[in-house]
Image (cartoon, coloured by chain):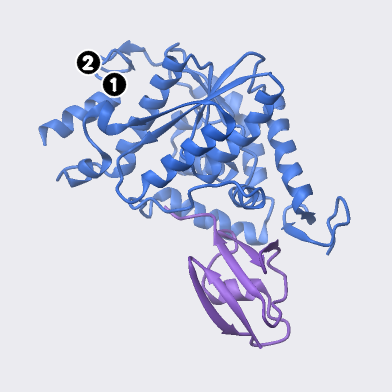
Chain colours: A purple, B blue
Amino acid sequence: MTFTLKYKDTLEEKEIPNDNYSIKDLINELGLSAQTVVSKQNGELVIEDTIIQDGDEIQLVQIIYGG
Amino acid sequence: MDCTKCGNPHVIIKREQSGQYLCKDCFIESIEKKVIKTIRKEKLLDKGDKVLVALSGGKDSVTALEILNSFRKMNIIDICAVTVDEGIDNYRQDGVDIAIRHAQRLGIEHKVVSLKDTYGITLDEIMEKPNHKGSCSYCGVFRRTIINKAAREMGATKIATGHNLDDEVQAIMMNYLEGNTDNLTKLGPKTESKAEEFTVKIKPLREIPEREIGLYVVAKDLEVHFASCPYAQQSFRGEISDVINQLCESHPTLKYSTLRGYDKIRKALKDDFKKKYDHGRCEKCGEPAANRLCKACSFLEELAGD
């Protein structure tokens, strides 16, 4: 079971490690802060508690830059 | 979870501070209502105002423009905008182009003013000087002076900036921790100066968290410049921001309570600590100045001497 991660103009196919793998888990795994990104599942804005499904395209849009 | 307001199952935000879940339409409406409420509560606008929006093309200023435009559509105010081009290669032009497109879309008077045309030097050129004081010092002073001048030239009665809740709370905490009571007296939704050359500044977004502004522009499909300034550095403000955001994970109402607490003591702070500056004129440019030269001209003199 895989999904496509779209982040900063790059696409990457990733494995879904378990049945309850959420966007929040993905954000944590990438070392990002949920405060700095918003998430889309198959083009629609969703909350970070959303569970990633097989074949999803998950886009993380960085909205806050440090400095 | 369904939208707390309308029951729509497609929610786009879970507000930790209130436990509310909102769908796209209810979220957009809630942001616009909140900003309008701040404007009314703090009396930020008067009928007939001409509001100059300091429009960088980033999420905050584009949101301020978008929501203030609803007052323009009701013929309560007029709006114009200024964009400052600091002269930062591979960064600023995208924001300038986006600002121009928003001004055209809304049909508002807009001007782009560059540091190069105004002061004969770009920020990139300043940063090549050996004894520069850091990009943010120059950028802040030159930008503020340009925006003030533009307000006078365009006949604006107010200047609106995109300062959000995070910006305000960071400023409160930074100045408190540094013991800077003078700066603490200058914060707030509306800043007025005794020098009439300084146009009143308003912050209509000061009660909206930064992340929600980001979500608002994405939800509304507004074109904005999402990018990091190449001169952005790890500043004290950045450290404060990290600490506050970390604390907010277990105390989600903290930013609001910090702002509310500050607002309660704001008047007392001003009464007891506001310094009375003698406003003279800058010998060089004639802008209001506390000393012989205004800050912009004194920077220019230092830079010319390098």
Spot occupied by residue B304 in the image (x, y as percentages of width and height): 13, 31
Q: Residues within 10 Å of mark 2 (few under 14, many from 20)?
A: few
Callout 1 secondary element: loop
Callout 2 secondary element: loop
Q: Which residue is mark 1?
A: B294
Asked if B233 appears above or below B124 in the picture, the reply is below
- For marks 1 and 2, the one nearer the N-term is 2
Q: Residues within 10 Å of mark 1 (few under 14, many from 20)?
A: many
Is B106 in front, or is B1? B106
Is B92 in front, or is B255? B92
Which chain is home to disc 2?
B
Quarter-wise, where is residue B150 in the image?
Answer: top left
Spatial CA distance of label 1 from label 2 is 8 Å
Q: Which residue is mark 2?
A: B284
Left or right of residue B217: residue B15: right
Which residue appears at 55% of the width and 47% of the height? B223
Spot occupied by residue A24 in the image (x, y as percentages of width and height): 64, 71
Residue B171 in view in this figure? yes
Which residue appears at 16% of the width and 43% of the height? B129
Q: Are marks 1 and 2 in contact (CB under 8 Å)?
A: yes
